[in-house]
Amino acid sequence: MRPELRTKIIEVCDKKIASKGDNVGLSFYAFFANKNNNPELLMEAATWWIQTHQLDHFVKAHKIKQMVLANL
């Protein structure tokens, strides 16, 4: 996963946890605006989420953050 996406995921997870609490869940769509202005990056996140790790649609933000920090 490219550094740009790692940074964005961690930032979004931190923001969601701060605003909604440690139990907040999110999907990979949370890392992108409603407009598909970077399809390559979106597909990279989707592949990591769905194909590589076979995650459910919604996963706890703290779990995603831990996975990204562990370079999974």
Image (cartoon, rainbow, N blue to C red):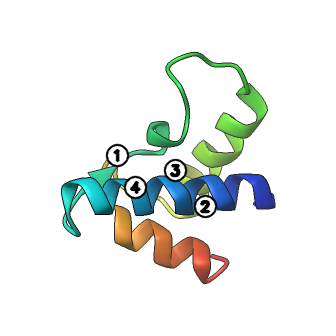
N-terminal of the pair, mark 1 or mark 2, is 2
Distance in Å between CA atoms under marks 1 and 2: 14 Å
In the drawing, what numbered circle is on residue 57? 1
Q: Position of residue 14 (x, y in %)?
A: 42, 63
Instruction: Specify few, some or many for label 2: CA neighbours under 10 Å numbering under 14, 14-19, or 20 or more.
Output: few
Question: Residue shown at 30%/62% (left/top)?
Answer: 18
Q: Position of residue 25 (x, y in %)?
A: 27, 55
In the drawing, what numbered circle is on residue 15? 4
Cβ–Cβ under 8 Å for marks 3 and 1: no
Q: Secondary structure at mark 4?
A: helix
Question: Residue shown at 71%/45% (left/top)?
Answer: 44
**Residue under label 3:** 50
Left or right of 49: which side holds 30?
A: left
Distance in Å between CA atoms under marks 4 and 1: 19 Å
N-terminal of the pair, mark 3 or mark 1, is 3
Which one is in front in this view, the residue at disc 4 or the one at disc 2?
4
